[in-house]
Image: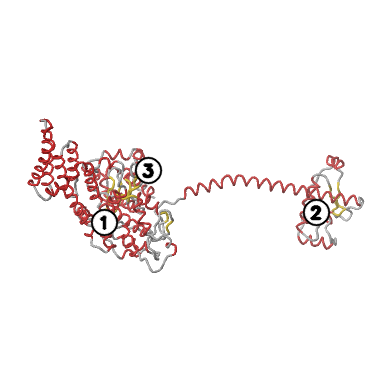
Amino acid sequence: MSQKRGTKRPGPSQVQYMDVDEEDTLSQTPTSSQVQHNVQRLSQSQMEAKVHELVFFLLVKDQKKIPIKRADILKHVVKDYKNVFTELLKRANQNLQQVFGMELVEIDPKHHTYILISKLPHLERESSKEDENTPKMGLLLVILSLIFMKGNVAKECKFPATPAQPTSLLPSVPNPPLLLSLPLAAVWEVLRRLRVDPGEKHKIFGDVKKLVTEEFVRQKYLEYNRLPHTDPPEFEFRWGPRAIKETSKKQILQFVSKMQNKDPTFWTNQYNEAEAEGSSAGGR
Amino acid sequence: MEEAGGSGGSDRRSRGRRSSAGPRYSRAGRSSFGQNRGGDDGAERNGEEEAGAGEGDRDDGDETTRRRLLRQQYRELITVVQKNREMMLSTRNDKLTEALEDANKLFIGVSRAREAALDAQFLVLASNLGKEKASQLHSDMTVFDPSAFAEDLLSFMGLNRLEGDESDSDNEQLASGFLPSNAWHKLGEEAKKYFRRTPTFHFMLGTFTADPPVQRPRIERQQKRAGPAERRAMPAQLKKMEESHQEATEKEVERILGILLSFFRDDPNDPISFLEFVTDPDSFARTVENMFHVSFLIRDGLARIKLDQYKLPIIEPLNPEEGENNQDTQARKQAVISMSYKEWQNIVKTFEISQPMIPPATQATT
């Protein structure tokens, strides 16, 4: 589809660009003045068409919620407009914000992947349509809540005697890291209570283990890692970069408070942490 | 709570190591608890008296200096800890454990009761701080209870605890009750409020997945499957049909020749009417077929057709040898015989044919 769309722009030099490694061409990022100069050489309509194409591409790509790679954008949309890529991205982002109320965010500065997040508050009414992702979001929220609320603590009491600790006597635990982690087993323990068992096929989620450890991970909602030096291997969950962008500790705490019918300040530590995050992120 | 447990553990440990100095701890601790420098002095004096009484004779200069240094270090440590009480109590650092570690190092050099008393004094101070730290930790961190959270989630999802679900009753850990089928949808709707997730759009003309259609492998498979099968089946079928067709015609021609010869042998002098021979009164189609087969006999020179006195065609078989001669001598003629349905009907009527001379092939063969 995208390739077909690509044919409408003039592209005699297309082939020669395609052969060049994407990362290479972009590593020599042109300065903004160079970009401006390049932009001026293109007609207004050429730029506009390209921006629209990019917006469309991003919207379609976002459907699966798998982060969009810059390499894919370059390959399928930008093609021989690489010299104005930053400008295209900027304008596409403007379009997304003004027209769709979304924002393009880079979640992995190393591999250059992007996601779209909503800038608009959630509307009660829009939830009328049933969509297969709705229950999944419920499950995800439960897992994120567990990671945040139970976080490190669960990890520590789960493994009280790792061999290194008794000899050194003084475990020098640094301040809790920003991303809390939770062992896989602790997550399943709670999910089983909610009648979601990783060993059984769930009537809504199907293969729950696959959903949680693969789909959510690919979408970057969760990070799923093997704990070092564990035999049999133990795994742990962390918040993924998409979760950090799409929600916040404060939001999660609010959810938990609502469910448990308590004030957020009830969990002082989590509350302080959420507040600290909120103020450092400029408040949400 | 866990952290508190950790420092408690280290306290206990240090106590264990110093068990040799055990009896003095309570006294020294009591005197120093809640006091300042004065307390230290008291304990020191106390220790000095005892040490002097017991071991005065073995004092050499070197040892004395070493012990003095040790005592000074202990006092310093105690002062530092007391001065930085707030910092020690903070949950953000491990100053208290660091201090304990330092004390442990000092204790290696302790050989006399006086230094041991100082160590005990520090330990009491540290334990008190540890206790305080633990209680502070307890108050500012309400432990999150995942199972209570799960119960609340189930309630939110609309769990009906009165209606028992039989399948779940075998596991006592799980809350029993009936969970409606839209439970996760309900939670999902709530969950959406906490995410800044972009909505997925849907297509006005029916569903259309964002995935590219998986047509490719299907096409390939079809081609693969169809290709060899066609090649294999088609020629085989054709060959068979041709063969069988040829065979059938040949067989039929031979059969008719046999019938003709048997009629001829029965009465060689009575000429066989071609029309009577060929015509099947029950079937026009079979009549035409018979004529077709007879034509092969004529072509191969196994029979010939001639007109009798009434100008009606008669058929007679030819001796192959004779035929060969004839073939050479006589010029062969071609003739086309047409027969319509009406003509066939007339023939049947005129010749009063009631039974075919050539019985139908199916009857004959089977």
Task: Identify the mark at residue B364; answer none if there is no mark.
Answer: 2
**Residue under the image location 34 percent in, 38 percent down:** A20
Q: Is mark 3 on a helix, strand or loop?
A: loop
**Vertically, is A52 above or below B155?**
above
Specify which label sits upstream in the sequence, 2 or 1: 1
Evaluate whether label 1 is on the same chain as label 3: no
Q: Could you give the CA–CA distance between mark 1 and mark 3, rounded to whole angstroms?
A: 29 Å
Mark 3–mark 2 CB contact (< 8 Å): no
**Residue under the image location 8 percent in, 42 percent down:** B45
Task: Identify the mark at residue B7; answer none if there is no mark.
Answer: none
Evaluate whether label 3 is on the same chain as label 2: no
- Look at the image and tell me whether residue A53 can be seen: no
Chain containing mark 3: A
- Identify the residue under disc 1: B143
Q: Image quarter for residue B72?
A: top left
* Residue A91 position in % (x across, y down): 26, 50
Please state which amino acid type lies under the numbered disc 2.
Ala
